[in-house]
Amino acid sequence: MIKVIASDLDGTLLNDGHALDQRTVEAIRSAQERGIRFIVVTGRNFTQTMEQLEGFDITCDFVLASGAEVRDERRRLVSRVTMDMGVCEEICGELEKWPVSVVFSTDTYDYRIGTPQEVERSLILQAQNFHVDMSEEEIRADPLFLRMSQNTRASASFEELKNANPVVYKIFLFSCDVVMLKRLSAVLSKDRRIAVAASFETNLEITDVRAQKGPVLKAYIESLGYGMDEVMVFGDSTNDASMLSMDFGATVAMENAMPEVKEMAKYVTKSNQEAGVAYAIERLLEDCTFSSSG
C-alpha cells in the first residue's frame, strides 16, 4: 500500500512553463486527505523551491539540491551534505579546460565567477538554453530571469568565492553543446567522491556522492517509519535515476522523460504538460493498477 508520494519538480510536477497546475494541487491534497505523505524531491535549493510553490499552501517534506538537504513538514532542517571546497577547487580547475558556464549552488545564493557583466551574460545564456524562442529583451523581462538574477552573486575568482566560505550544495554546468557535455560527464564521473547527473540534456549537476535523491529519500522515509514498498516516486531526468532505479513500491517516469529514465522506471505516466503526476495519483486513489504505457 502506498503511504508516501515523492516527486521531482521541473519536468515532472511542473509544466513546461515551470508552473503547478491546479489539477496537480488538487490531486496532492486528495492524497494527503487519505493520509498519504507528500515529499518534493528537487534539484532546487529551499528558497527557489518555496518561490515555486508560493501561493499553493502545500504542506510537505523536502529533499532539496538533489539530496544535499532534507527539510521536514515544518520546513526545519533535518540533514545536509555539502561539497568539500577542496573538491570544488579541483573540479573548477578541470572545468576551466571546457567551454561551459559554471554555477556554484548554495543554501542561499548561486555564485558565478566573473565580472558583473560576464555573470549577466551567463544568466542570459542559461535562460536562452531553456527559452530558445525568446529574444534577449524578452528574457530580461521574464520573471524567472529576474528571480535568477536576484539569487545570483558574482565572484571575481574561485579564491574570492572560497574566502566567502559559502555552503556549496552542488555545481551546476550548462552548454548548448550536448555532445561535449556527455564527454565532460564521462570525465567527471571517474571521480568517486562526486555524483554527476542532469536535469536537462543541456546541463550537468555535480554533488557530493552522498547527496543523491534516491538514497537520501530512502534514509529519510525509513527514519519516519515507512518502508520502500510504501513509496511512489516520480521523475523525468538522470538526476532522478537514483530514485527510479531503486526498488521503491512504484517508480513512475513521465512521458516526457529521457529514454534511459523511462527504461528504468516500473511505470510511465502522461507528460508534465498533461498533469501526468496528477493522473497517476488519481489512478492510485481509485485503486487502479498502472500500465507500462500510462
Image: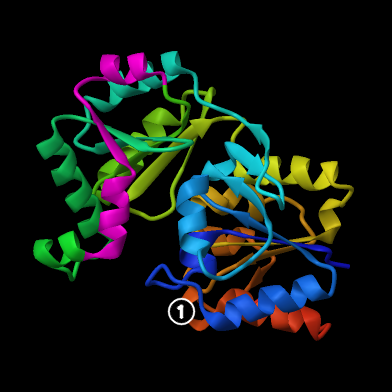
In the rendered image, which residue does mark 1 sit on?
273
Residue under the image location 18 percent in, 71 percent down: 133
Q: Residue 69: x percent and y percent?
A: 60, 38
Q: Residue 56: x percent and y percent?
A: 56, 71
Q: In this view, does 248 lie to the left or right of 28?
A: right
22 vs 294, nearest the viewer? 22
Which residues are drawn in magenta? 142-165
Query: Residue 165, located in which quarter of the rendered image?
Result: top left
Q: In this view, does 94 lie to the left or right of 21?
A: left
Q: Is the magenta stretch mostly helix, strand or loop?
A: helix
Q: How crowded is mark 1: few (under 14 residues within 10 Å), some or many (20 or more)?
A: some
- Looking at the rendered image, the quarter that the C terminus falls into is bottom right
- Amino acid at circle 1: Gln
144 vs 264, nearest the viewer? 144
- Element at label 1: helix
Query: Residue 213, located in which quarter of the rendered image?
Result: top right
Magenta stretch encompasses residue 161: yes
Query: Residue 57, located in which quarter of the rendered image?
Result: bottom right
Q: Is residue 31 left or right of residue 43?
A: right
| Vertical side of 49 occupied by 122: above or below | above
Q: Residue 247: x percent and y percent?
A: 76, 53
